[in-house]
Image: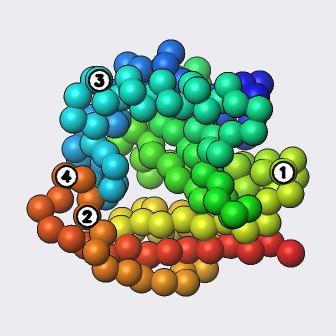
Amino acid sequence: MKNIEIITKRLLLKPLGSEYLQTVKAYAMDSENTRYMVHLPNENIEETISFLKGVDMEWEKEDPEFYEFAVIYQKEHIGAVSIYFENGIGELGWIINKKYQGKGFAYEAASSLVKYFTANFGTTHFIAHCDTENTASYKTMEKLGMIRVGEYGGRRNRCASHDSFEYKYELILS
């Protein structure tokens, strides 16, 4: 399945994998870059290696349960965008290296996933979650046309000392 590449106006999305260890490490082990993330920051290089090995294995499957893409801008790996499937619903996620945030890359990458998976897989139902304090993320969801459908407590971001709240957004295409 490793042959999916998506080209947007400014970006190339291609399968994320072990070859991106150093650039993934740069954003995934940075506590400032990942302050609103449940599963990040990675605590050590071994954790990043293990994650990327799992991604490599998933890309080798004939019918992957999730797709993690490297976001490439001007030939540089600047982040990742993903879609995880459960019961036909695609859950979107993204992370952009803090040096490249605020330039619309998360929106451009996520929007291209919605278009690609709708056209090629028939996916019409998408969701996304974010910390309620992550304004950039929920504004990206809203720009994608997603509607806020819930707010929940009990979210514990990995580097946080207390629980927070999260929003759930949804997009249903007809």
Q: In this figure, which residue is indicated by the disc labeled 2?
A: 156
Question: Taking 26 as reference, is 81 left or right?
Answer: right
Residue 140 screen position, x and y as percent: 54, 63
Residue neighbourhood size for the residue with mark 4, other residues' Cα within 10 Å, grouped as few (<14), some (14–19), many (≥20): some
Q: In this figure, which residue is indicated by the disc labeled 4?
A: 159
Residue neighbourhood size for the residue with mark 1, other residues' Cα within 10 Å, grouped as few (<14), some (14–19), many (≥20): few
Q: Is residue 11 visible?
A: no
Q: In this figure, which residue is indicated by the disc labeled 3?
A: 46
Residue 69, disc: none
Element type where label 2 sits in the image = loop
In the picture, the quarter occupied by the N terminus is: top right
Q: In this figure, which residue is indicated by the disc labeled 1?
A: 121
Element type where label 4 sits in the image = loop
Q: Amino acid at mark 1?
A: Phe
Residue neighbourhood size for the residue with mark 2, other residues' Cα within 10 Å, grouped as few (<14), some (14–19), many (≥20): some
Q: Is residue 167 above or below residue 22?
A: below
Sequence-wise, which precedes: disc 1 or disc 4?
Answer: 1
Task: Find residue 47 and report its image quarter.
Answer: top left
Q: How many marks?
A: 4
- 36 or 154: which is nearer to us? 154
Q: Amino acid at mark 2?
A: Arg
Q: CA distance from mark 1 to mark 3?
A: 34 Å
Sequence-wise, which precedes: disc 2 or disc 3?
Answer: 3
At x 65%, y 55%, the residue is: 85
Sequence-wise, which precedes: disc 2 or disc 1?
Answer: 1
Residue 174 screen position, x and y as percent: 86, 75
Q: CA distance from mark 2 to mark 1?
A: 33 Å
Q: Do residues under tags 4 and 3 come within 8 Å of each other at their CB atoms?
A: no
Q: Do residues under tags 2 and 3 come within 8 Å of each other at their CB atoms?
A: no
Q: Is residue 17 above or below residue 126?
A: above
Q: Amino acid at mark 4?
A: Cys
Q: CA distance from mark 2 to mark 3?
A: 22 Å
